[in-house]
Amino acid sequence: MKQSQHLLDNAVICSKLAKRTTDKQAKTHFKRMEDAWRALAREQDWLDGEITPVEASRLGRRSASGNPHPDAERTGSAPSSVG
């Protein structure tokens, strides 16, 4: 399994925890953690030469309107926005 997939798995866990909690502060915390894990996954893909720096930058700018990582559909996690 790719290293970035492990990072995406952590993002999925955070997403699930955010959906389950009713505490607004905890929900925000988990969503931020999810975003951070996804950013790390993009960085790992770049380090592994799987995506170019331009792709990594473009993917990093996506918000709730699009998946922040190309493997996001495979993990079954919906993208989130913090705000």
Image (cartoon, rainbow, N blue to C red):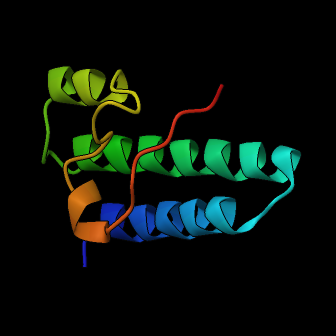
Residue displayed at 39% across by 61% down: 77
- Residue 47 locus on image (x, y percent): 28, 44
- Residue 30 locus on image (x, y percent): 69, 53
Extreme residue in the front direction? 22
Q: Locate the C terminus by quadrant.
A: top right
Residue displayed at 67% across by 59% down: 18
Residue displayed at 25% across by 48% down: 45
Extreme residue in the bottom direction? 1
The answer to which image quadrant residue 67 occupies is top left
The answer to which image quadrant residue 13 occupies is bottom right
The answer to whether 79 appears left or right of 24 in the picture is left
Q: How many numbered dots are placed on residues in this image?
A: 0
Q: Locate the N terminus by quadrant.
A: bottom left
Residue 29 to residue 83: above or below: below
- Residue 72 locus on image (x, y percent): 28, 56
The answer to which image quadrant residue 28 occupies is top right
The answer to whether 37 appears left or right of 79 in the picture is right
39 or 30, which lies in front? 30
The answer to whether 21 appears left or right of 42 in the picture is right
- Residue 76 locus on image (x, y percent): 32, 68
83 or 58, which lies in front? 83
Residue displayed at 63% across by 62% down: 19
